[in-house]
Every structure is written in C-alpha cells, then in structure tokens.
Amino acid sequence: MKEISTEELHKKLINGEILNLVDVREDDEVEEGMIPEAKHIRMGEIPENLDAFDKEKEYIIVCRSGGRSGNVCAYLEDQGYKVTNMAGGMLDWKGDTKRKSELA
C-alpha cells in the first residue's frame, strides 16, 4: 500500500497541486477540524459511495492516526481504485484545518 507523510502532503498542497483527499473519520472528529481540501465520507459509508470515486484518479485517504484510512485503502485497492494512505493521520497534520461546518 502506498503511503504519504503529512509533511509531503502539506508541501503538495502548498505548491498548489490538485489532490483528491477523502477524510474517513466520524462526524464529531471532522468537526474538530479537517484538511480544507478534503471530502468527508465516513469509513462505514465508503462501500455505498463507490460512485463518488473514479478509477482513473488517485485518492489520498485520511483518518485520525492512519489505521482506519489504511483499512479503507486496502478495501478500495481490492475494488480497483488507486489510493494512498496518509501515514500518521490528523494527529500528525501540521497544516491548516477547518471545521466541517465552515466548509459547507
């Protein structure tokens, strides 16, 4: 499974790269703050939201510490999607965050 560090991801965003970030944490977790560019799809809702993913694109999956996102990456890889796990999760994230309610 491919991984990206929080530092590498932060540099890519600062450089203006357009990335497909998916935050798989629960609502209360993302309300505390998520990466502004991320889309929120709870881990348990990934299987019923596969139509939100494009097999031609690569997705970076984000969670609190990297464990749940790793599980989601394994599942999506099995379905034929290109995914990368953000190692260390939001616990290691030093970049900007916004509350989900601020993004709506």
Image (tube, rainbow, N blue to C red):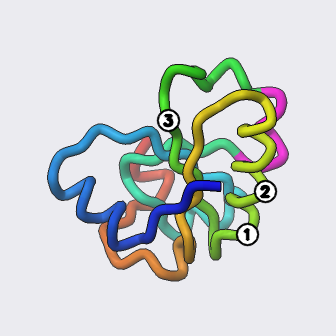
Q: Classify 16 as above or below 57.
A: below
Vertical position of residue 21 compared to residue 27: above or below:
above
Say what secondary structure mark 3 lies in. Answer: strand
Q: Is there a contact, CB below 8 Å, between mark 3 and mark 2?
A: no
Mark 3 vs 1, N-terminal side? 3
Residue labelled with disc 1:
67
Residue 93, horizontal then vertical, whole percent = 43, 75
Q: Are marks 1 and 2 in contact (CB under 8 Å)?
A: yes
Q: Which of marks 3 and 1 is in front?
A: 3
Bounds of the magenta span?
42-48
Q: Is the magenta stretch mostly helix, strand or loop?
A: helix
Tags 3 and 1 in contact by the CB under 8 Å rule? no
Amino acid of disc 2: Asn
Residue on which disc 3 sits: 58
**Mark toward the start of the polypeptide (3 vs 2):** 3
Residue drawn 58% across the image and 52% down it: 61
Amino acid at circle 1: Gly
Find disc 2 in the rendering and name its residue. Answer: 71
